[in-house]
């Protein structure tokens, strides 16, 4: 029994040794290199670029007061639709004391002159009725009294404007009522009731009461790299995708390319603007981030292969054409003339036909399969 046991153990050790030797020998043998294979096909190739930018109204206006004062009423809210001339807010005037004093003095002087003109008129009228003065002299006195009345009215209007911001004679065009200058949607009202506001003058831009824009006339604004700007032209179509509305696709046409570059993160870029064709402006908001896709070049029905099958050598390009089949495959290195590439497929202008088959990159075996 002991003799058979020793023989059995020796046989197991021999099998393990032989198995290990065979395994290591197989691992050391060179494996057959397998390549991807491609057949040239007729396809459309497009070279596109993506530009990041924003959707903005073409016409966005800041509404500012014509006089300084305090906001007493706000009649609109952001998002409301307004028409040109519609009242947005009301301002209470805080009069300048120097101007107020001058206006009051003018009213007093005008009343004194009017009283004197009325006395002169009554005296001259009595003389005219007695035919003691000529009609020309009487007309001059009457004219002086009419001018004194007009001066009183003008001085009172001026006092009301200084004190209240509006007079009885121009109440319909009151500068205390802040009106929209365009028709559109109110984007923002940065003031509240009780805020002090100032009008535009030489020294400042004035307080913005509201921002109004026409949301039916939108533009896309973005920047394009200097290496691609030369391929653009006025009217080139664009596809706009809004970041917040992925399901919404908009058409646009390029209408402006800046003549001057700006530096952005070390790269020279040019600002562009495109007119957006609005289909449903209820969903769009001013300032939405958006991407514009532009087709820079396109070739239709061209012979193409994957660009990964191309070998670049200096200014020349080559492919490896497969000859034979099965284990007797041979690869012929052939020079080809290439054209437009979209980053995946490339156009072959010369050197291949649809009957050829070319070698692609080497097939990388899965690690699980190797194990």
Image (tube, rainbow, N blue to C red):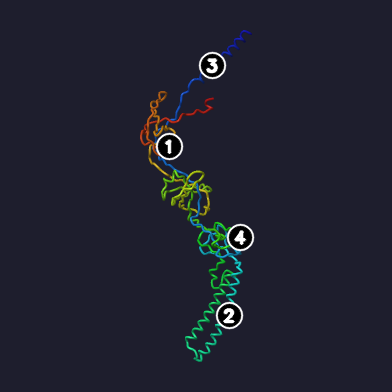
The crowd level at tag 3 (other Cα within 10 Å; few <14, some 14-19, many 20+) is: few
Say whether disc 2 or disc 4 marks the residue closer to the N-terminus. Answer: 2
The crowd level at tag 4 (other Cα within 10 Å; few <14, some 14-19, many 20+) is: some
Q: Kindly report the distance in space between the C-alpha atoms of the residues bearing marks 2 and 4.
A: 44 Å
Are the residues flagged by discs 3 and 1 in contact, CB closer than 8 Å? Answer: no
Give coordinates of residue 302: x percent, y percent: 38, 39
Vertically, is 287 above or below 21?
below
Residue beneath disc 1 = 345
The crowd level at tag 1 (other Cα within 10 Å; few <14, some 14-19, many 20+) is: some
The label nearer to you, 4 versus 1, is: 4
Q: Kindly report the distance in space between the C-alpha atoms of the residues bearing marks 3 and 4.
A: 89 Å
Say whether disc 3 or disc 2 marks the residue closer to the N-terminus. Answer: 3
Are the residues flagged by discs 3 and 4 in contact, CB closer than 8 Å? Answer: no
Residue beneath disc 4 = 192
Residue beneath disc 2 = 112
Q: Where residue 21 is drawn, which disc sits there?
A: 3
The label nearer to you, 3 versus 4, is: 4
Q: Please tell me whether mark 1 sits on a helix, a strand or a loop.
A: strand
Q: Kindly report the distance in space between the C-alpha atoms of the residues bearing marks 3 and 2.
A: 131 Å
């Amino acid at each position: 029994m002991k003799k058979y046991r020793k023989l059995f153990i020796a046989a197991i050790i021999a099998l393990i040794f032989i198995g290990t030797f065979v395994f290591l020998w197989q691992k050391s043998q060179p494996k057959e290199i397998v390549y991807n294979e491609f057949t040239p096909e007729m396809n459309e190739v497009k070279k596109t670029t993506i530009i990041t930018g924003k959707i903005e109204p073409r016409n966005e206006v800041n509404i500012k007061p014509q006089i300084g004062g305090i906001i007493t009423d706000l009649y609109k809210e952001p998002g409301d639709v307004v028409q040109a001339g519609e009242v947005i807010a009301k301002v209470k005037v805080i009069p300048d004391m120097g101007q107020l004093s001058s206006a009051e003095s003018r009213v007093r002087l005008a009343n004194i002159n009017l009283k004197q003109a009325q006395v002169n008129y009554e005296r001259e009228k009595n003389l005219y009725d007695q035919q003691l003065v000529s009609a020309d002299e009487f007309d001059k006195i009457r004219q002086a009294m009419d001018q004194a009345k007009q001066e009183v009215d003008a001085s009172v209007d001026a006092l009301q404007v200084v004190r209240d911001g509006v007079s009885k004679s121009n109440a319909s065009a009151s500068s205390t009522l802040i009106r929209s200058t365009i028709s559109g949607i109110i984007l923002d009202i940065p003031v509240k009731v009780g805020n002090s506001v100032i009008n535009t003058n030489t020294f400042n831009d004035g307080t913005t009461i509201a921002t109004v824009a026409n949301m039916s006339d939108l533009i896309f604004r973005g920047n394009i790299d200097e290496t691609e700007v030369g391929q653009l032209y006025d009217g080139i179509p664009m596809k706009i995708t809004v970041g917040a509305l992925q399901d919404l696709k908009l058409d646009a046409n390029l209408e402006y390319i800046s003549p001057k570059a700006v530096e952005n993160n070390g790269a020279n870029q040019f600002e562009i603007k495109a007119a957006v064709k609005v289909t449903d402006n209820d969903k769009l908001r001013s300032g939405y981030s958006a991407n514009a896709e532009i087709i820079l070049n396109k070739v239709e029905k061209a012979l193409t292969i994957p660009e990964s099958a191309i070998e670049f050598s200096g200014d020349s390009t080559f492919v490896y054409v497969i000859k034979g089949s099965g284990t007797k495959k041979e690869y012929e290195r052939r020079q080809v003339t290439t054209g437009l590439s979209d980053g995946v497929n490339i156009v072959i202008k010369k050197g291949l036909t649809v009957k050829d088959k070319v070698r692609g990159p080497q097939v990388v075996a899965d690690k699980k399969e190797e194990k």
